[in-house]
Amino acid sequence: MTGSPSRRKSGGRAGRVAAREIPPPIAERAVGPGVTGGLYRPLSDRDQQRIHQAALDILQRIGLADPIPSCVDIVTSGGGTMNDAGRLCFPRALVEETIAKACKGFMLHGQDPAHDLDISGQRVHFGTGGAAVSIVDFSTGQYRSSTLADLYDVFRLIDSLEHIHFALRPLIARDISDSHPLEINTAYAGMSGTTKPFGLAFSQPETVEAVVAMFDIAAGGEGKFKEKPFCHTSNCFVVPPLRFAADACRCLEAQVRLGVPVVLLSAGQAGATAPAALAGAVTQAVAECLAGLVYVNLISPGHPALFGTWPLVSDLRTGAMSGGSGEQAVLMAASAQMANFYGLPSSVAAGMTDSKIPDAQSGFEKGYTTALAGHAGATMIHESAGMTASLLGVSLEGFVIDNDMLGAVLRSIRGIEVSDETLSVETMAEVVAGPNHYLGHAQTLARMEKDYVYPRLSDRSTPDQWESAGATDIRARARGKVMEVLANHYPGHIGGELDARIRRNFDIRLPQTEMKPGNRRW
Amino acid sequence: MTGSPSRRKSGGRAGRVAAREIPPPIAERAVGPGVTGGLYRPLSDRDQQRIHQAALDILQRIGLADPIPSCVDIVTSGGGTMNDAGRLCFPRALVEETIAKACKGFMLHGQDPAHDLDISGQRVHFGTGGAAVSIVDFSTGQYRSSTLADLYDVFRLIDSLEHIHFALRPLIARDISDSHPLEINTAYAGMSGTTKPFGLAFSQPETVEAVVAMFDIAAGGEGKFKEKPFCHTSNCFVVPPLRFAADACRCLEAQVRLGVPVVLLSAGQAGATAPAALAGAVTQAVAECLAGLVYVNLISPGHPALFGTWPLVSDLRTGAMSGGSGEQAVLMAASAQMANFYGLPSSVAAGMTDSKIPDAQSGFEKGYTTALAGHAGATMIHESAGMTASLLGVSLEGFVIDNDMLGAVLRSIRGIEVSDETLSVETMAEVVAGPNHYLGHAQTLARMEKDYVYPRLSDRSTPDQWESAGATDIRARARGKVMEVLANHYPGHIGGELDARIRRNFDIRLPQTEMKPGNRRW
């Protein structure tokens, strides 16, 4: 470890204060993307084996309904069969062989390589997700339909928040009604709003092709996107229980052929589209994702695909989704563990809340769901920031608040390093023979930045200090941060000439005038 | 499993609606006290072994300073030695023998046996703790000194909240300045305010004796309390680093002799009174608690004692405690795991927050800290409800909000049962051959109450419903619940004659007129 020259030269109290003001280099910071999880194991080895065997049984015996003709061709060419009920069945051997050969890890690129993510092992990354149809209006505090301008702002906000590692589009631009221009403009907003890896979803394969063509322009020419894909896609190829979704399957084939990393998403709702018994909800999702994995790997062996088991929870009194429940927390953690059982990169959802605003309910639901998914070793945790109302809405303050939370959760996942030095026996012997406290001890000063995460907005003052400073809650403090970022942070990594070329070729609806400081209310 | 007759006879939609309104018997509810944790293991087997060996080394080689004469007598009679620096050292064999013989589990009684808790294994219980000096005033929202009336109200509130299993006194009645009457009245407030197991802390052995005499009166005669002790005590017998606290040790000896279950509490602050390296903070606390365990077991072999490793976190920029940090979350989880390594019942602290009020920060800090401590298998989790401001304050709304959170966390700890029935393969086969959804399926109806926890206050409505209902946050909804409980819930289990006898023998300052409905603002 090397400090900056000014840190090494400084001494005494003034030197320590100065040292505190210089954050250490990124590599020496307490947390970053990809801390290793997996120490929370809700399922025993035997439980995992039983879920696996049940999933194989389901795929072989029950199969999936409604495969599109190309899917039937692809899967039957690999050994699958159509049964008498018109369902596509997957023999055990085919599934097990696919698991063995499937992609176990890949680099998820950002447009800025500093944001590249190593999606492998049980390395944990937090990011956004969702397809919210509304936003808590920043001025009125009321729910309203979300727009393209909101989407661009949200991408910029995420771009500025260090503990949100990737940005699947969290909301739908409802001011664009047709899916093709909507998805083109969503892609443009993501590409121009953040240099972190981002994600999209598609309705038609033609749109996938158009968007990849746009990315190729931004990346410097045809085929360039495929070399370092900076965008992944979430694909709901299955409509639980156990039925293929035709349009999504057509998109999936296009995505795989065009080299887009894909989340194979199974999002059944326990008690509605998945069994109410939690083990059954996991099992059905595992079976569905294994079917998707076979499909993808028969098209392109080793294609980067995430095991996206997202068994969601219903409140069985009303049928409404409850993404913030304790049942949801353990379901997602168990789902991540099943992906780890297979050694596959995973996507789960955590950080959902049933609350409509960033209040204490939102906080605790996000706190335990993100912590348990992360400690279970999920590689990509979608939905982990900004979402409200069981994914129906987003809150700008929410992204900023959740960033602080994710920093702390990442710190807890990093865990406790045990070594002769950290066990501190000699340090204790020194301290009890001397000052009887560790304040100012060399170990304390050395560990201060390397081992501890300091939040941006979370309050650690005394009650007196807090009251003197206006007795604010974190939501009020987050508003200031939102305004500061949105007024000033415009990534601007896509130059004027490139942008003009994209605008000549595509129906881009975000005005250039809104993409620099001094415009709109920010 | 048996349902009530009306549930078994009913059928159709009306029957199902009626069934939903009858909660199932407690034994069939989704969660209760004592769900088994331990599936989150932040420390590897080797890490635990190294911490253990380092703690033994510290006890044998460095020892503890300032033992009182009786402590020296007791420990040296068991093989301990005083070293040249005047520190009491514990040979490895003595410590290991103590661990082997120490109490591995006991019944923590409530005055109502329905609230008895089996403190053993990795059975998780959530309760309160702390010694807050202030309260967020329910009317003004401002911090003010806490009083005896507040304390009684808080005990009553906890008594009504199902997921808070025990009640260590969360606040100090600052309207009583001397410690003896303060602690007598604290004991009286707990004994009369709740029938759940409760907890106290003491300054002098004489007060311990007086309080046990008072409990004997309530329990029906001399020696009755010791038969089924309904009160435990938190004892800070050590001032970290590695120094005995004289008064606390005198109290400890009295508590052990009088049969009071005791939390052996080591609460060093990392970077101040404990090493900044997290492994060192755990190791020092383990060493200190092992010293306490030897001391207790030499006085009374097998006495019910909890391994209370509470390594706290400082914000190293300011020295202020940060109970809501990610570092804190993993420190407490690792501490619980060390107690489990020894097979000892444990106490850790989780649910602390640095926020001053129940906002989103408070929510997420409480969410991840309680979840990780619980999943690590702590047997008693103190501080898990109501606390604010890094334990400096309490919030009445906070207790009610945290109760919802703890219900969800308990549900996540209960985990996922895997069996032929829950794997649901046959249910899936039925569903895909029939309605293609699980709504109304027999499995769904059967699992609805047994497997799912329904919150009291957490909002699961749609944005439209929420706005129509007044767009409240959970804190506003909690206020209504606080007022309802405090206006009506007076346990009243200590009869008038007994109470009069207690009042004749002790200086009880809580007026009887305030202990029934219709008084004060409630």
Image: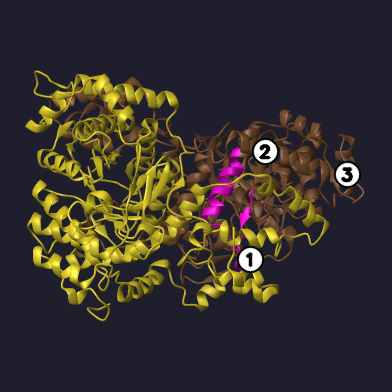
Chain colours: A yellow, B brown
Closer to the N terminus: mark 3 or mark 2?
A: 2
Closer to the N terminus: mark 2 or mark 1?
A: 2
Magenta segment boundaries in residue numbering: B310-337
x, y (%) of residue A1? 59, 57
Disc number lying in front (2 or 1): 2
Callout 3 secondary element: helix
Q: Is residue B439 left or right of residue A414?
A: left
Instruction: Name the residue type under label 2.
Output: Arg
Which one is nearer the viewer's eye here, A193 or B477? Answer: A193
Q: Is residue B475 left or right of residue A323?
A: right
Tell me the residue that label 1 is attached to: B319
Residue drawn where x is 62% and y is 44% of the image? A418
Q: Chain of mark 1?
A: B
Question: Which label number is shown at residue B72?
Answer: 3
Which one is nearer the viewer's eye here, B514 or A372? Answer: A372
Tell me the residue that label 2 is attached to: B50
Callout 2 secondary element: helix
Q: Chain of mark 2?
A: B
Inter-mark Cα distance, 3 to 2: 28 Å
Inter-mark Cα distance, 2 to 1: 29 Å
